[in-house]
Image (tube, grey):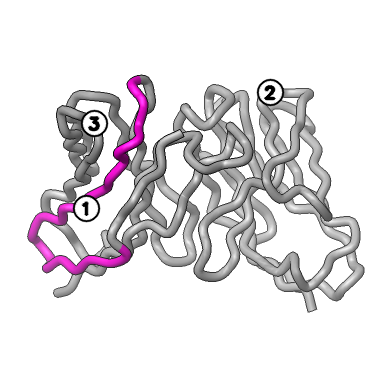
């Protein structure tokens, strides 16, 4: 099972792109990378996921390196409402139950005016 | 679509009291989950239901029971609440069982046990 590593905190100016990195060097070939976020006092929210190719949706873009050992979540034009804790998850990593998402500590993103 | 709803939003209990946390989803998902989140920590799985009629223990099941009432509803019961169960409880659902399908979360129930 792959373990993920994220920086504990990052800052980003409003309107700029926020690039959140994640290392998952032990990921196996058929494991997806998922990103969730949790805005203060709210339930976690799914953002995006990918396997090999870069992915984009209305919320964000996900760039996965060719060797799949790391990825970057990109919020193209960060707003104050994007201030949250962002979790990079490779399902099954470090969990006792195969059904649990291992949220870890994530990256606390602060978007400033 | 309301997604995943949880009731109540807040609850204060005294040690030894019992209560049931309710969760419902309107996405026709097969699987449902209960997590707890303690301050400054990640979410930990309490129980899950891979499909209607089945329930299984997660990482921290002690002190809790669950009921998958039907496909839509999954309840979590505390028979004799303890201060260690003070936490925020999140319910989630997914179309397929397992952690490899997107899970959608409710807004949470904030429980304090005095």
Q: Is residue B2 visible?
A: no
Q: What element carries label 3?
A: loop
The residue at the far front in this view is A26
Which mark is nearer the camera, 3 or 2? 3
- Residue B78, given in percent of the width and then of the height, sits at 83, 56
**What quarter of the picture does the C terminus of chain A occupy?**
bottom left
Q: Indicate which disc, 1 or 3, sits on the residue closer to the N terminus.
A: 1
* Tag in front: 1 or 3: 3
Is there a contact, CB below 8 Å, between mark 1 and mark 3? Answer: no
Q: How crowded is mark 1: few (under 14 residues within 10 Å), some or many (20 or more)?
A: many
In this view, the residue in front, A31 or B95, is: A31
Mark 3 Cα within 10 Å, few/some/many (few <14, many 20+)? many
Residue drawn 35% across the image and 46% down it? A88
**Helix or strand or loop: what does disc 2 sit on?**
loop
Which chain contains the residue that carries disc 1? A
Residues marked 2 and 1 touching at CB (< 8 Å): no
Residue under pointer 2:
B51
**Mark 3 = which residue?**
A68
A2 shown above or below A83:
above
Image coords of residue A70 (percent x, y): 23, 40
Does mark 1 fall on the same chain as mark 2? no
Q: Position of residue A97 (x, y in %)?
A: 62, 37
Pointer 3 with pointer 2, Cβ within 8 A: no
In the displayed orientation, state which residue is furthest to the left.
A16
x and y, in percent, of residue B65 in the image: 83, 46
Part of the protein shown in magenta: A8-29
Q: Is residue A26 magenta?
A: yes
**Which residue is under mark 1?**
A20
């Amino acid at each position: 099972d792959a373990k993920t590593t994220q920086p504990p905190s990052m800052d980003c100016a409003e309107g700029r792109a926020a690039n959140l990195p994640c290392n998952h060097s032990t990921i196996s070939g058929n494991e997806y990378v998922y990103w969730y976020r949790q805005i203060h006092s709210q339930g976690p929210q799914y953002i995006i996921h990918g396997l090999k190719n870069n992915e984009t949706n209305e919320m964000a873009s996900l760039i996965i390196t060719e060797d799949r050992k790391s990825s970057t979540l990109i919020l193209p034009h960060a707003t104050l409402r994007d201030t949250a804790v962002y979790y990079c998850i490779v399902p099954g990593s470090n969990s006792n139950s195969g059904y649990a998402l291992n949220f870890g500590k994530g990256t606390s993103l602060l978007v400033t005016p | 679509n309301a997604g995943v709803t949880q009731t109540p939003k807040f609850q204060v209990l005294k040690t030894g009291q019992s209560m049931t946390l309710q969760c419902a989803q309107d996405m026709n998902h097969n699987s449902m989950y209960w997590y707890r989140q303690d301050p400054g920590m990640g979410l930990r799985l309490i129980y899950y239901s891979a499909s209607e009629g089945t329930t299984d223990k997660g990482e921290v099941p002690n002190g809790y029971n669950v009921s998958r009432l039907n496909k839509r509803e999954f309840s979590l019961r505390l028979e004799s609440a303890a201060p260690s169960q003070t936490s925020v409880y999140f319910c989630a659902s997914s179309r397929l069982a397992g952690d490899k399908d997107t899970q959608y979360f409710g807004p949470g129930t904030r429980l304090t046990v005095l």
